[in-house]
């Protein structure tokens, strides 16, 4: 769905992250939510109907990017830049996570 | 930790306020949930200076470099990747970074938390492959990401034109642009003379439009846009001249303008005013940017959409206001005049009345089957049904449907619920209030609360 400009210029990725255990190339500056868009099936599912969802706003106001990042559940993926070796897991999350 | 001033947001408004306040010698902390300074417009400005996307992002973007550099050396303490989730009287701010919470204290608070894109529901907007234009631009500024396949843009306003231009500059392709703007109304044309003061800004818009026309098709005068597909976006359909049209699509980017972020000021009980032309709420502020609550200031797009240059100047004005309020400076009026802040702000806002009239929020009737609340999947029809059996109060709709109870706390559905209540009860939207917003402003985990208690015990 999205591709790095640098990949189009033939550059190698900057790092590898693990998405649901699968080694996935990633680029400096991008966020967890950006990676979720590239890996098929990595997004969350609506806790109400089970339909697939992907990050929508990329700026912290829709909560469609919730993921488990290095073991921390309900992380807003669009606010977290990738780091080498980062473990990203899809959240099949609870319906309500606040309060 | 305790500071003279806590600033929420390291965008143009927050950064320029911090720089000014440091000149007065105030102790300043700037908190931002992004990993680096810049806010929305200048996102990733430091890292991108050496990136191939830098030239394509345009001259306005590049202006952020000097501001971010001045902010870095200002001596303000900067807490990146940190969210503010509660602000208490007095003032105490509760923050979370990397799953750990902490509390800081400040004598004055400046909310420079900016804007978000206006949520505009339509059929299929929850389908993977559909996202906002702002989201795509953020992907470009952060990881240098370009959309692939058949990319459609639907919406109106300066941002889609700007983003499309940035994308085309980088060799990206747009299959088509579904323009939702209505032909300029008299109110817009009447404001054109004022807009000429920003002639460069107007020309820029026209140039962007020409670029898009060359690259793809522009569709106007359609209705009932639908994004369809199984598990992800596959095609778009719309109604035009009595016929249903259908195209293949991989990515659909939508945008209908931006609105202030109001959860912080609503939770603090600040007085707000309703901007009827643009259909949003914004905290009321005085000529120094002070809200209805003493020593709580609001600057930049958070107090009304004005764009990045006006945000920079309003940040400086608020800094002077805070210096006056805290007794740090007694010359704020003179300083305000000397820096020509009012004249500069007026010029920065010259194009705004024209843009506001040119791009009103969509006011077409929402079909019953469209999801209004993404988190709880509540449709417009369900909200209408609840509204018919309740007073014109969003709390009643929330209790009946769960709409607004999900993690986004009404950031995506608040205005839709307000509009549907107004529709059902035959009231002007301004007479229906927004959801009650209570802290925490972000979902807070038990682990975070525990870390807060531990830190409190240690001090
Ligand atoms: C997605 C998007 C893209 C845009 N792109 C452009 C553009 O390319 N060109 C243009 O001219 N205008 C753009 N705008 C308009 C934008 O609002 C500018 O006018 C400008 O960035 C406003 O500056 P500001 O300082 O008021 O707020 P912003 O620049 O929005 O800065 C606010 C900052 O506050 C932070 N923040 C908010 N709430 C919290 C919280 N609770 N805790 C911690 N931090 C918080 C945010 O992370 C953000 O960095 C865009 C707006 C949006 C929403
Ligand atoms: S993508 Fe919307 S909150 Fe992260």
Image: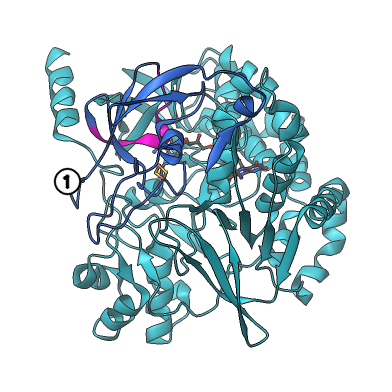
Chain colours: A blue, B cyan
Closer to us: B62 or B368: B368
Secondary structure at badge 1 equals loop
Q: Is residue B433 visible?
A: no
Q: Which residue is under mark 1? A: A99
- Residues rendered magenta in the picture: A73-83
* Residue B149 x, y percent position in the rendering: 60, 48
Dividing the picture into quarters, in which one does residue B436 lie?
bottom left
Check the picture and name the quadrant holding the C terminus of chain B: top left
Q: Quadrant of residue B180?
A: bottom right
Asked which quadrant contains residue B53, the reply is: top right
Which residue occupies 26% across, 24% down? A70
B189 vs B459, left or right, is right
Q: Within the magenta stretch, is there residue B448?
A: no
Q: Position of residue A11 (x, y in %)?
A: 61, 19
Q: Is residue A75 magenta?
A: yes
Place of residue B265 in the rendered image (x, y in percent of width and height, measured from the top left): 40, 48
Task: Please report the residue visible at 75 percent of the width from the left and 34 percent of the height from the top.
Answer: B58
Q: Depth check: give the residue in front, B194 or B100.
A: B100
Looking at the rendering, the quadrant in which ligand 1 lies is top right
């Amino acid at each position: 769905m999205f591709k790095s400009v640098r990949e189009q210029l033939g550059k190698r990725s900057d790092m590898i992250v693990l998405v649901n255990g699968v080694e996935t190339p990633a680029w400096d500056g991008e966020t967890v939510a950006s990676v979720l868009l590239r890996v098929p099936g990595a997004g969350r599912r609506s806790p109400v109907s089970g339909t697939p969802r992907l990050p929508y706003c990329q700026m912290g106001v829709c909560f469609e990017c919730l993921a488990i990042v290095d073991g921390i559940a309900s992380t807003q993926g669009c606010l977290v830049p990738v780091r080498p070796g980062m473990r990203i897991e899809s959240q099949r999350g609870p319906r309500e996570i606040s309060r | 930790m305790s500071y003279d001033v806590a600033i929420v947001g390291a965008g143009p408004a927050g950064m320029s306020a911090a720089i000014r306040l440091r000149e007065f010698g105030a102790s300043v902390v700037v908190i931002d949930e992004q990993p680096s300074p810049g806010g929305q417009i200048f996102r990733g400005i430091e890292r991108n200076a050496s990136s191939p996307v830098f030239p394509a992002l345009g001259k306005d973007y590049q202006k952020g470099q000097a501001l971010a550099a001045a902010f870095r050396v200002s001596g303000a303490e900067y807490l990146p990747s940190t969210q503010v989730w509660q602000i208490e009287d007095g003032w105490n701010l509760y923050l979370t970074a990397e799953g750990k919470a902490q509390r800081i204290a400040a004598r004055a608070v400046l909310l420079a938390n900016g804007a978000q894109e206006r949520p505009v529901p339509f059929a299929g907007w929850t389908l993977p492959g559909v996202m906002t234009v702002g989201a795509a631009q953020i992907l470009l500024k952060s990881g240098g990401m370009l959309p692939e396949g058949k990319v459609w843009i639907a919406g109106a306003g300066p941002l889609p034109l700007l983003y499309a231009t940035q994308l085309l500059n980088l060799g990206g392709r747009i299959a088509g642009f579904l323009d939702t703007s209505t032909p300029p109304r008299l109110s817009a044309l009447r404001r054109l003379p004022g807009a000429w003061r920003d002639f460069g800004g107007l020309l820029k818009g026209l140039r962007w439009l020409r670029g898009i026309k060359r690259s793809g098709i522009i569709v106007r005068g359609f209705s009932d846009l639908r994004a369809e597909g199984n598990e992800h976006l596959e095609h778009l359909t719309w109604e035009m001249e009595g016929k249903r049209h259908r195209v293949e699509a991989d990515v659909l980017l939508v945008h209908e303008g931006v609105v202030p972020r109001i959860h912080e000021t609503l939770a603090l009980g600040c007085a707000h005013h309703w901007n009827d032309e643009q259909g949003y709420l914004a905290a009321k502020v005085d000529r120094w940017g002070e809200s209805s609550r003493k020593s709580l200031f609001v600057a930049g797009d958070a107090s009304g959409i004005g764009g990045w240059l006006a945000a920079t100047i309003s940040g400086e004005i608020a800094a002077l206001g805070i210096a006056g309020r805290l007794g740090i400076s007694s010359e704020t009026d003179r300083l305000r005049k000397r820096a020509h802040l009012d004249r500069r702000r007026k010029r920065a806002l010259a194009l705004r009345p024209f843009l506001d009239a040119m791009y009103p929020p969509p006011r077409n009737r929402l079909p019953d089957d469209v999801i209004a609340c993404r988190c709880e999947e509540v449709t417009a029809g369900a909200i209408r049904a609840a509204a018919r059996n309740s007073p014109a109060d969003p709390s009643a709709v929330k209790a009946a449907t769960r709409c607004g109870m999900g993690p986004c706390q009404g950031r995506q559905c608040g205005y839709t619920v307000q509009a549907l209540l107004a529709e059902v009860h035959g009231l002007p939207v301004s007479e229906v209030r927004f959801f009650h917003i209570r802290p925490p402003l972000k979902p807070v985990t038990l682990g975070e609360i525990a870390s807060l208690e531990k830190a409190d015990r240690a001090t």
